[in-house]
Amino acid sequence: MTTLLQIKELQVSYGAIIALRGISFEVHLGQVVSLIGANGAGKSTTINTLSGLIKPRSGQVNFEDQDITGWRADRVTRRGLVQVPEGRQVIAPLTVRENLEMGAYLRRDKAEIEQDIQAVFDRFPRLKERHHQKAGSLSGGEQQMLALGRALVARPKLVMLDEPSMGLAPLLVNEVFAIIRSIKEEGKTILLVEQNARKALEIADYAYVLERGQIRHHGPADELRQNEAIIKAYLG
């Protein structure tokens, strides 16, 4: 398998507080890899570091065999790592369409951008119906669709999803994971950070369990779903 993303001994601190204690993991081309763990385990810190929002204390981030450690967020995005942030973070005063156009702010190919926006509308008919509506007036589920669509317009090589189910009702959680599954089936590579371990392990190919800034378990997702320690701690 082709290794798309490789993390080596990544350490991140917030002042005297150590958030990540030398974690290492890989994401292969076409895989869905999930990072699971409780609140405060270091999941979002990991993805924000990969996105260039946080600078690591030490360690290395390699993407497509290039060292991108400490790159600025815009440069990381241009390279093809695109984050769907925790809490969606759509731009509330802008319309649905304007939010999608923001996903292409680093692109200059106008005709293809329009094709990609129309592809998002085909995937999410509710967004097409509301394309002139302010993003802040959408439901939580619709905002998550918009955040995913905005990321897809950026034409990512790797989509990084940070807690996509957070704050959603159970039916909407199922809908969001169905969307993630459809993106997976199209061959997209996905790094999924998710507190809902059951849902994450159902969709992932491989998973890593973070506890207090360290990787405590890892393996094929199907195997982790049968692991008694994982069941007891995360699956109930």
Image (cartoon, grey):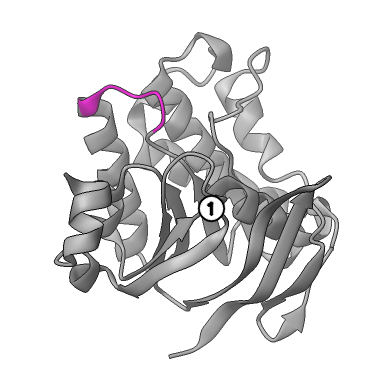
Q: Is residue 86 above or below residue 44?
A: above
Q: Amino acid at mark 1?
A: Arg
Q: For mark 1, does the 10 Å Cα neighbourhood hold few (<14), some (14 to 19), or many (20 or more) residues?
A: some
Q: Is residue 205 left or right of residue 102?
A: left
Residue situated furthest front in the rendering = 16
Give the magenta part as a residue range.
Answer: 166-170
Q: Which residue is rendered at x = 54% and y = 30% of the image? A: 88
Q: Say if residue 82 shows up in the picture.
A: yes
The residue positioned 31% from the left and 52% from the top of the image is: 200
In the displayed structure, 166 sits above or below 113; it is above
In this view, 90 is above or below 55: above
Please tell me which residue lies in front, 118 or 212. Answer: 212
Q: Position of residue 172 (x, y in %)?
A: 27, 28
Q: Position of residue 127 (x, y in %)?
A: 43, 26
**In this view of the protein, can residue 77 be seen by the observer?**
no
Left or right: 144, with 229 as reference point: right
Q: How many marks?
A: 1
Left or right: where 21 falls relative to 121: right
Secondary structure beneath disc 1? Answer: loop
Q: Residue at x 32, y 38 (%)?
A: 176
Tell me the residue that label 1 is attached to: 212
Q: Position of residue 97 (x, y in %)?
A: 59, 27
On the rendered structure, is 82 left or right of 35?
Answer: right
Question: What is the residue that sits farthest to the top in this orientation?
Answer: 137
As for residue 167 lying within the magenta part, the answer is: yes
Q: Which quadrant would the N terminus be assigned to in this image?
A: bottom left
Of 201 and 110, the residue lying toward us: 201
Quadrant where the C terminus is found in the figure: top left
Give me the residue at 57% from left, 40% from top. Answer: 150
